[in-house]
Structure formats: structure tokens, C-alpha cells
Amino acid sequence: MWGDAVEIAAVVMVPGSQARLDSGFMETSVLTSILCSPTLASSQQQSHFRDRGGSHCGRGSCWQGFICVAAHIPARISGFLAQNQLAHRTTWSDNIVSGHQTSIMDRLKCTTFILFLMLVASLLPLGGHASPPEMGTGNGDTGHKPNYTKKAFPVLSFDYKNVRIPFEISLWVLLASLMKLGYVPPCQQPMALNNSLSPRGVGQCPEASVKLKKASDTQRLLTVPLRFHLIPRVSNIVPESCLLIVVGLLIGGLIKFVGEDPPVLSSKLFFFYLLPPIILDAGYFLPMRPFTENLGTILMFAVVGTLWNAFFIGGVLYGVCQLKGVNLENMDLLSCLLFGSVVSAVDPVAVLAVFEEIHINELLHILVFGESLLNDAVTVVLYHLFEEFSSVGSITVTDVFLGIVCFLVVSFGGIMVGAIYGILAAFTSRFTSHTRVIEPLFVFVYSYLAYLSAEVFHLSGIMALIACGAVTRPYVEANISHKSHTTIKYFLKMWSSVSETLIFIFLGVSTGGRRAQLELDLCDLYGVIGLTLVINKFRIVKLTTKDQFIIAYGGLRGAIAFSLIYLLDKDHFAMKEMFLTAIITVIFFTVFVQGMTIRPLVDLLAVKKKQETKRSINEEIHTQFLDHLLTGIEDICGHYGHHHWKDNSSDQIKAHPFLPLFRLNRFNKKYVKKCLIVGERSKEPQLIAFYHKMEFKQAIELVESGGASKLPSAMPSTVSMQNIQPKKVSQDRALPQVSKAREEEIRKILRTNLQKTRLRLRSYNRHTLVADPDDDGWDDFLIKRNRIKDLDKMSHMTHHLTVPAPPPDSPTIARARLSSDPQAWGNKPVIEDIKPVTGGIPTIKVELASPQSPESVCVVDEFKKDSNEQEDGLVMKAMSLVSKKDGTGEDDIEPQQRLQRCLSDPGPSAEEEEDEPFLP
Amino acid sequence: MRCFDVTRRSVPASLMKLYKSVILNKQIHQPPMLIEHKHTHAVNILQLFTISTAHIIRLHDRFKELDTERRGYLCPQDFGAIKGLAINPIGDRIIGAFFSPGRETVDFYTFVKILAHFRPADNIRPKESSSPEPINSRTNKLKFVFQMYDLDKDGKISRIDLLKALRGMLEMQVTEEQLDSIVDRTIQEADLDGDDAISFEEFRKSLEKVNIDHKMSIRFLR
């Protein structure tokens, strides 16, 4: 089957481009088609391709029409591509990567084409699914084409059936990933733009501007192909989820058009495979502090709000049904309530997808996010309850009471299960020190087990996952190695974003495949219901009205509701089809209308955009100062400090049912930790990693301050900075009254280089990993502080014990020149090979920027340099000395000393001797 | 002010009793007791800084937490132990702000007094102009910041003051020359009387458009 697909793709490609393609490309495509599809191997004439393919397709009833359609579009595209000589003797995927020179339009077309091919390839197997008899015969190609049976030994055999399912799954995943690739989140666009626009202010100095232009060119070349715009403008307005659904709709429509049953987002697939990664990701990266801080509010929203919504909507629905009497009389109250309960579930997937994009105030984010996570329990319970009731028929008071109990059991049971597995995972991770490779797996497997175990008892699996993630994280992080931790982080992000994409696509596909059975009045009715549902989400919380509105507006519905309805037993619910249609309407309404309008609304209403227009330099600096100040004061107040539970127990947490649990946790922390966390052992690699990072940064810094302009484009600001610099020096002293352009420049320097304060609330973002302040901020700071100290020391030294230095360079420049000038380095013996430093410690090599100096700086080896190279060794030594002496926390000094000892080969004594002269 | 269950907190009993009586008798707006009384501080805190009891208690908890050796006062080292502060580029200045010149310790009263700068401004502004300006007024907040810039305490932000502050805050790629030029430019921009330094008036002027209350308020001290 796959061969068929490829063959058809090839057929599709060939005829349209025949006229224009040069023979080289022709050969390639023929070759591919021959390779991929034995059926075509016999035909040597290109002109027969079309006919052959056509007749061949005729075999599968569905394909013929499809091909006719398909042949046109890609043919045109490929023709276009050929015209641009994009496709010259390269494969299609290579085009994408290597097509820097072409405009965005070309790239766009290219992508669309690739996507289309993908679709073709993935659709056909799916389509074939519905015609099993043909598949059975059509599969073994030997049976089909008798002239092949003569072959003595099957050199190339074909067995698609074997790989069909995983292959299709991979194709879908690939499709999802490609969609992801094509979508540029709006937040990233301006940044990219800024970067490419940066060289503007440097017009006066031609050299600099040329350099800059080069730099930005390379930068653009590097960045653009990675995130080419699938739909450049649209992504500004439309949230990603909408686009995905649209794509899904298109695919679904296509499949429908071909005449096959589109794959439905089966609830099993959804609940067992697609949902868990997303929820685990959310739970694992749950910003604990803001979450618990607002737990009261969140619970309020989740429980009371959802209950209220469910009953209100159910009631209204019932009322409307009774009133109108338009073929809806058979709707009983229970069905209405059931529908209400399902529809009142805010979907975390949809909500997260939209809210992350609009960059809303983090408090609001956590409120809506938390609510959507927690109200799952409510929904599931209500759902089961009503389902049960409606199958039984009569409801007693005891049933209601039991329902309430059930709710408690479901939610707390889920949490308990999750917590148990979390503790297990933490405990297991204690013993993984010798098999680092499988460490991450434990987290995933235990979490998944938690989810499944909870589902066994119809407990809330979502709660279990969240609890598991949240419980596991601190302990596991302490236990596992740094790299495993990174692995976990990236895997979670990867899985969750892919499955999110898949969910949306599937949602679209399953809808596109349905019969368009939206009766208009129903549509209206549910539109109104959707609105009321939005409106009645206003609740009594101490938030501003705007916040309330945004929260209410952000309640998006998604795949969960869909799946729940889909799960309904058709025997009990005659209305299932109608419900499905209705729920799809609601989902689409919320995702499209609300999702698309929420961004403008946010802009319009509350979140005042910071006015970029005219901020004086003073303001720029002072605001930054104030930010730092406030962060510092907050630290002092312990508002976000370690003893958070304590601080916070005063506020909302009092309302929190697990308060005793948390207290217990705090009290027992040392005991629990003792149990679950291995001692200092695990700290060591992290420290080393950190140390290396630090050294690496210092080395980079050295290189770049030496005027090397060929930096990796990862550091855009430095590139521009370095190039601006010379002009600045010359101009600055001369005229005190500066021009507008220079002011702009200063402003830009400030904007790019003022250190950002840590985020007040650590934000949660599913698409990217938010830098952990404990990781990076700390490193940066230490390096910086060392540098400042170093700087002071240097200036001190030049003042007092100096040689009358010929160049009036600043210490930085002088230092940089010394250390990164290739000439200066050239005649020094450079230690090329990295000696096996004490067991397993990784070493860092830094390529100097200038190509003619092939030597690499081994930072570790710096320590071993002879004292006759003092000018070179000096910098590093002074720094490391400072870092040793002035390490900010007392506890840092010890390990660092230890580290240096183990990092420097000759042993501590020699090193200390060397260092002494530099002590003040 | 949120109503608060004081009894559950671990506050010194005497202090607590006093708080309660103060609150119950609505004495908050009466002039501070000047008699030598062991509770004077507590009353002062309540009256001068109009911080709610809940927050006082909370801050007291925090104070005790920072005071690891139970001395009843804090040393710079105690502040230095706060990790977040250690990575703060102006952490040293912040710590310095808590210690009046020549003193090596800070007691709870001063602690609260400093932090009181960071209360959000009250929405209901008491109209009596006779009362002294509250410590969390815009001017006082600005003064606080100004003093943090002004390391040499000469009442002006000089070139050197600004240079030091900026060096802390800017990323390391910025060269000394750039730093110099930025400082020059900054002072030129704000300096109205041409003394190559920024006085408090000039400082205030330059920050006219900034919402200081928003920038210098901690949420929980609401």
C-alpha cells in the first residue's frame, strides 16, 4: 500500500512538471518511483506513467477521483518549483533545508507541497482501510502482477501490511510536527524582525554596517528556514489550535471526498495516549507556588463554578426544550443535565493552547489553567453520575448523597493514587545512580501507571497525573543527573506538544468527516447556550471585573467534552448524535470565536501594553532598578521564599482541604527527604556541569570581547554590540551633545542588555522550556559578579603595579586583546590534546573565532600553564580565584574549592602558589 | 484589611494582646504613644505604617526566620543568606538600605519600617492634610530609591554612583566605553542645573511618567 502511495505521489509529481523539469530531476523522480514501487519497475517510458498510474489506481475505487484532484494542485506547485530551480537534482526535503535564497513565498509553496505529499501518503493507507478485500489482494504485489513471480529470489520484497499501523502513526505524528514547524507563534515574530532590522542605526560607518549586515544575514539564514511562515499573517490573529482544527477539517474533508471514513478521534486513543502526556507535562511543570497560592480561588472556580455551570446549563437546556417544542420534546432532564455537565468542562488543552499564546498576566493564567485542570474531576463525576442515573431511571436522595461522596472519592482518590506513584517514583530514582540512561523512563512510566491505575477505579486520572508529576518532581530532580533531568524536560515538552497538535487535527478530521447535520435552529440554540455558559462563569471572587471577564471568556471547550459525549452509550441516549453535533458546535465556537477574539480583547481591556514610545534613558534605567529592587524586597519578605507554606497559610490556603497534609509535609520534609533523596552524591554532577557552564561562558566572553565578530548567531545582541562599539568610542568623547540616532543606540543597548529580573511568578509555557531561574540566573550572576570583581582588580592592578602601558586601552580591551589575539597566542605552546582529566569529568573546548588559529582553549588546562605565560593565564586565574574567594553563599565555597582541586591536574598546591601574587 | 485569626499564629503573647487591643479600640489614627513602653514599637508600627496586623505577624515570622541565631536583630549576613537576594544585581544596595549608616544590625521595627515603603498606596486617601505624609507615598518611595542610588550619601546621584549601579545591572557584553557613554547620556538627560549629577528633584522629574506606586508595591502587603 505504501508503495502505491508513493507511486501515486510520483505520478502526481511527474506529469505536471514534465514540461519544465530538466532531465536530472526527472531521473531522480523516476528512480525513486522505481525503487519504491515494484509495479512501476517494468515501465521504462515516462510518458506511460500517467496511464499506468491511472489504471493502477482504478484498482482501488477510491483513488481515481482523488488523483484527478490531486494531480492538479501539486503539479502546479512542482512546476513552480522547477521554474525556480529549487528542485534541481535534490530531494524534496532537501529543498526545504537548502532553500535559503528563495523568498518566503517559494518556501511556503514548498512546504505546502511537502505537507500535501504527506497527506497523500498518509491518507491513502487510511482510505484503503475501508476496502479490505482489495487490500488483501492488492497487498502482495507478486500476486497481482504475475510476471513477477518468475523472480527466483525476492531481492526487493514489499510488505506494507506489516508496518501499516506504526507507519501511519508515524505519518500522523510527522504531520503534526510539520504543522508545528509551520506555525510561528506570534511572540516570536517581532523578535525575529527586530533582529533582522537591527543594523539600521549604524549607517555612518560603512565597515561596521557591512559587517553587521553580514552578521544579520547569516543570522537570518540560520533562523528563517527553521521557522518559515506557513501562514505569515494569519498566525497573528488566529490561535494555533484553530489553525490545526482547520487543517484537520481539510484533511477530513479530503478523506470524505475520497469516499472513505475518516479516522475518528476515538476516546480510547484520546484518553490513553494523547491526553496523558499533556496532563503530565502540565503537572510536572506546574508552577507550584502560584498554584497553591491561588488554590482557594482555583478550587472555587473548579468545583463550585463547574457545578453551577452544569446545573444551570442543564436546566436552561431543559427549559428551552420544553418551551420550544421543536422536535426536542423527548429530551428529558437527565440528558440535559448530562450535556450540561459535559459542556461545563473547561478543557485544559484548549485553554492552555490559547492562553499561552496571548501571554496573559500570570495570575490569570494560573487561575484558568488550574481551574481547567481541576474541574475535570467534577465533570467526570457528574458525567458518570448522570449516566448512571439515566440508565437507572429513578433518583433518590441517597443517590444524590452518594454522588457527592463519589465526587470526593474520585478527586481525592485520584490525588492519592498519583501521590503514591509519585513517591514510588521518587524512591526508585534513589537507586538509579548506576543506570543513568533509564532514569527518565521511571518518571514517565510511573506517571502513566498512576494514570491507568486511577482509571481502573474510575478515579480522576488527570488528578492522579497532576499529583504524580507534582510530587515526583522535587525528589526526582534531586536524585537524577542533570542530563536526565534535561531529558525529562524535553521529552515531556515534545510529547505534550505533539499530542496536543494531534488532538486538534483529529478533532478537525473527525468533524470534517461527519455529515453536516447541523440543523440551524439547533445551532442557534447552542450558540446561545455557549454564550450563557460564558456569561454565567462570573463568580464571586476578589478579582477585577476585567479579570473575571477574561477568565470567563477563556473557558474553552475541547476534546475532552467531545470524547466524553462520544463515549455515551447509544442505547441509553438516543440523542447522542445530536449531542455530538452540539458539542462540536460549542467546541468550535469557543475555540474559534473566543480563541480568536480573546487576544484583541485582552489588548483592549486590561493588560495595558507598555508604552514603548518615548521612554527616556533615565526611565529605562530607573524602572529596571525598581524592578530589581522589588524583586529583592520580595525575597526579603519571603513572599516567594522557601517557607512558602508558612507564609501562605495565612491567605487562601486556609481554605484548602489538604492543609494538614501540607503542614505534615513541611514538618516531615527532612524525614521524607532522607528517605527519598540520596545524599550529596547527586549534587556533584550538577555542580560540575554548572562549573563548566561558567567556564565556558567566561571563555566565550574572552573571545568575543577580543573583537571577534563571527560569533554563533545564538547571541545576536553581542554581534551587534561588537560592531557598534568602535564607532561609539570615537564619537563619544568628541561631542557631548549627541544626536537622535545615538540616543536610540543607547536605548537599544539598554533594552537588550539590562538584566531581566526574574519572573515574579514562574511562568508556565508548554511550547518552550522556561529558563529555570535557579539554573541560569544563578550562573549568569556568578559569572558576572566574578567579572566585575575581576574588572575592579584589573583596574586596581593597572593603577598600582603597572608597567607604563603603551595603549590607553581600557582594562577590558587590554585583557581581551591579550587573551584572544591569535598572534599573541601563536608563539605560545598550546596544549592541544586534552589530557584525561580525573575520571569522567567533561572538558570544554572553545574554538577561537579566528579560523587561522586552530588551537582550542581547554579551559581546564589553563590552570596548568606555566608561570611564564602569565599574561594569558592571568585572566582565568584571577577569575577563578575570585570565584573561590567571593562566592556569594558560604556553602558555595567549599564545593568550588573541591571542584577546582579535582579539575586541575597538578594538585592544589601548585595552583595556590601561582595564585598568590594576584591577591590584593 | 482582611480579618485574620491571630490566635493561630506564633506571636509573642504580649505583642498579640496589644495588637488586639489596638485594633479593637480603633486607636489606629491617634498619635503615637511616646511613653517609654515595651510595646511602643508595636504600636508605632501599626500607627505609622498602617500595616495590618496580619502583615505585621507575617513579617514577624519572616523576621524570625531570617534571624537564624535568634538574636532579635538581623545582620547583613542574614540577608546575604537569602538566595534570591544574592543573585540580585543590586542586592548589596538593598541590604544596605536596611542598615542606617554606622549600624550593623536591624531590629524588627526598622525592618518593618523599611518594608513599609513597599505598601501599595491606599485607595482612600485620608483628607487630613495635617497628618504627615504616609511612608508609602510617592515621594517617600522615590526618596528611598534615590538613597539607594546615592551610595556616597551626598544627596546627589553622581557619575560614579550611577556607573556603579549600571555596571551591576547591565549584561557583561557592555564595554566600559559604552557604560561611560550611557552614564554620560543619562546624566545629561536628567541634569537640569548642570552640576553633572542628579539631585532628588531632578530624579523625581525624570521619573514623572513612571507609575511608582505600581512599580514599588508588593502584592501581599496590600
Image (cartoon, coloured by chain):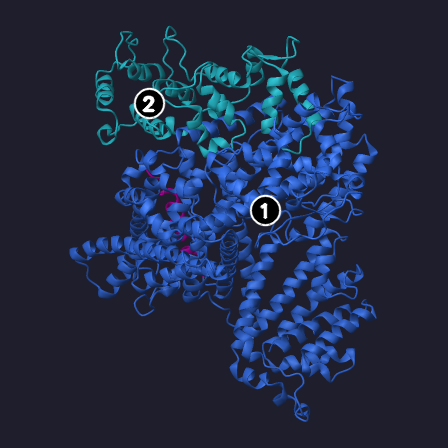
Chain colours: A blue, B cyan
Residue holding disc 2 = B72
Residue holding disc 1 = A903
- Residue A385 screen position, x and y as percent: 26, 59
- Examine the structure image and report whether residue A251 is included in the region drawn in magenta: no
Type of the residue with mark 2: Gly
Magenta segment range? A518-540
Determine which quarter of the picture holds residue A364.
Answer: top left
- What kind of secondary structure does the magenta stretch mostly adopt? helix
Label 1 crowd bin: few (<14), some (14–19), many (20+), radius 10 Å: many
Of circles 1 and 2, which is in front?
1
Q: Residue at x 41, y 11 (%)?
A: B133
Type of the residue with mark 1: Leu
- Depth check, front residue: A455 or B92: B92
Is label 1 on the same chain as label 2? no
- Residue A497 screen position, x and y as percent: 52, 55
- Residue B155 screen position, x and y as percent: 55, 10
| Secondary structure of residue under mark 2 | loop
Q: Is residue A804 above or below residue A823?
A: above
- Depth check, front residue: A286 or A558: A286
Locate the C terminus of chain A by quadrant.
top right
